[in-house]
Image (tube, rainbow, N blue to C red):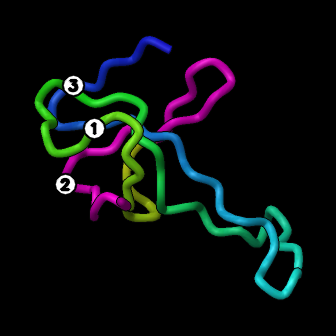
Amino acid sequence: MNFQPLGERILIQRVEEATTTASGIIIPDNAKEKPSQGKVVAVSDEVKSIALNDVVVFGKFSGNELSLGTDKYIVLELEDVFGIIK
């Protein structure tokens, strides 16, 4: 993948949540919410506070979806990121 975000943007790939509950109930695809966490796969040169492979939390409806090949990503503005999971 060759994608370089510009401005104060990052490219993330959503981290999928579990498909079953703690009690073992299987959650169907149509009942799942969009994950609000993602792994950073590209960072613009202007962003210094987030690094590659960080896992970030963002708003459910933030960013713009992008398909590169068969994979789906989200381009986020830095201001749409709530924080980094350590």
Residue 12: % across, % down: 44, 40
The image quarter in which residue 41 lies: top left
Q: Quadrant of residue 35?
A: bottom right
Q: Nearer the viewer, residue 31 or 83?
A: 83
Provide the secondary structure element on which disc 3 rests.
Answer: loop
What residue do we see at 24% from left, 43% from top? 50
Of residue 72 and residue 46, the one placed in the foreground of this image is 46
Q: Earlier in the sequence, mark 2 or mark 1?
A: 1
Identify the residue at horizontal 31%, vertical 19% (top origin).
Answer: 4
Q: Is residue 70 magenta?
A: yes
Q: Residue at label 1?
A: 51
- Which numbered tag is attached to residue 79? 2
* Mark 3 or mark 2, earlier in chain: 3
Q: Which residues are magenta?
A: 65-86
What's the residue at 71%, 68% (across, down)? Answer: 32
Q: Residue at x 46, y 64 (%)?
A: 60
Residue contact between numbered discs 2 and 1, judged by CB atoms under 8 Å: no
Label 1: how many residues lie within 10 Å, few (<14), some (14-19) or many (20+)? some
32 is within the stretch colored magenta = no
* Discs 1, 3 touching: Cβ within 8 Å: no
* View extreme (bottom): residue: 23
The residue lying toward the viewer, choosing from 59 and 84, is: 84
Residues packed near mark 2 inside 10 Å, few (<14), some (14 to 19) or many (20 plus): few
Find residue 6 and name its label: 3
3D distance between C-alphas at marks 3 and 2: 14 Å
- Position of 70 with respect to 15 (left or right) is right
| Position in image of residue 68 (x %, y %) | 56, 21
> What amino acid does circle 2 point to?
Glu
Tell me the chief SS of the magenta region. strand
